[in-house]
Image (cartoon, rainbow, N blue to C red):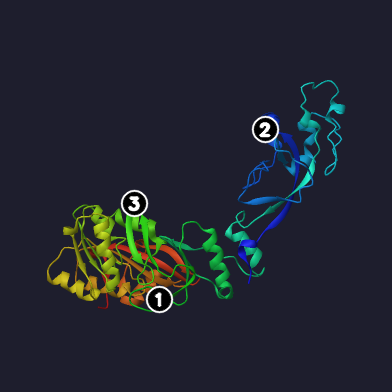
Amino acid sequence: MVEVESINEIITVEAFIVSRKELNDVMLKYNKVLLNKPKIPNIIDLNKEYMTFSVIDLQKKVSKDKVICLLNSDFIENDFSEWFGAKNPNILLGSCKIDVLESLGCERPEIYSWEFTEIFDLKLCLNFNYFSYKEILRKILPSNCKIPTSFEIIGDILHLNLTEDLLIHKKIIGEVLYKKIKNIKSVVTKIGNISNEFRFFEMEVLEGDHDLNTKQIENGLIYFLDYSKMYWNSKLQSERKIILNYFKPNETICDLFCGVGPFVIPALKKGCIVYANDLNKDAITYLKKNVVENKVNSSKIFIFNENAFSLIKTLKTQNTTVNHFILNLPEKSLLFFKEIVSLNFNSMIHCYFFCKEFIQPWEFVYNEISIEIPKSNFEMIRSVSPSKNMWKITIKLHEIEKSNF
């Protein structure tokens, strides 16, 4: 088993020693020739400890009143003489003197003593803290494995989907991500497809806390949830903002699959009346908590925990005016879309559904529910897999052409 925190790399840089009292002059005069490398300063003080590297095998004596300056190796090879003003400087890398004075003659009487110093090779050991998680995984995983670069963070939980070839390395991947990504308490991966009506999936905790209760902040609003028991997708944050822009104060919104409230809470903040439904009792519990935590007007929300078909019929029976329906259950949304259309609601509908890559979404919808919808009302939201996309229909129901009911 690889000890990930022991991962390191030794590099060699060119360096010279300078006294502290002359350091400001060095920095001012030759800043452009000093090392420019992320996470490594170009001035090393041996009295300090550095988080990302350590000096090793130092062959030179460096007193407390001196520091080590690191040079850009490209500069040394190509431009050193130009910067030091020497026509033919005697530069011997590794164990030499820079005989600048001899080449300059009396033209530069202000030359400092450090300009005669010896340039030497300095070894630095870059440690675990220096490298990104991608760099560490590249060092650990077989060369034919693709490094996972896409993941989602929900509160303080990191969720990633691993391809088949990476599953055998899941523990080491989880450990690296847990130690390298800031402010997370758990790393989880999906171990099965969504196979239940509540839309959450089986997952495995690869590293960290097995309690998946978390707090997600989105657009200034707080959402408490238990990621092991309910659905959340942070990738839809911008999409939720788009939908919210359709709503006007005092309009009535019906979210048939509301979850913990990512559409509901901002709609309430905007002054809308909201009918919120979800079959998942745990999600409803957290929705109620989120209503309280966000201090929204609880008199404007009506919460249901029932089958969405039943709620649709209840709203119709009671002649409830619904300005917007949100259908975010992509596996089954089209069935509820058809039900709403059949009951002649005069509403705008925002319906998300999945469609295979090789099928035109408007053809798919017509084949599924025998409703013809103009192409202009379709928008692809995101790619779910190489063969499947998530689409959205946005349309006012009175504009729909119906057939074959």
**Residue 213: where, in percent of width, then height?**
37, 66
* Mark number displayed over residue 220: 3
Q: Residue furthest left?
A: 318
Per the image, the residue denoted by label 1 is: 194
Dot 1 or dot 3, earlier in sequence = 1
Which residue of the protein is positioned furthest toward the front in this rendering? Answer: 64
| Residue type marked 2 | Met
Mark 1 is on which residue type?
A: Ile
Q: Amino acid at mark 3?
A: Gly
Q: Nearer the viewer, residue 136 or 113?
A: 113
Instruction: Give the image quarter of residue 256.
Output: bottom left
Looking at the picture, how far across and down is residue 37, in whole percent?
66, 46
Residue drawn at x 58%, y 69% is 172
Q: Is residue 96 above or below residue 84?
A: below
Q: Spatial distance from mark 2 to mark 3, Cα to Cα?
A: 44 Å
Quadrant of the image containing the N terminus: bottom right
Image height of 151 relative to 119, above or below: below
Image quarter of the C terminus:
bottom left
Query: Label 2 to label 1, Cα distance in Å?
Result: 59 Å
Q: Dot 2 surroundings within 10 Å: few (below 14), some, or many (20 or more)? A: some
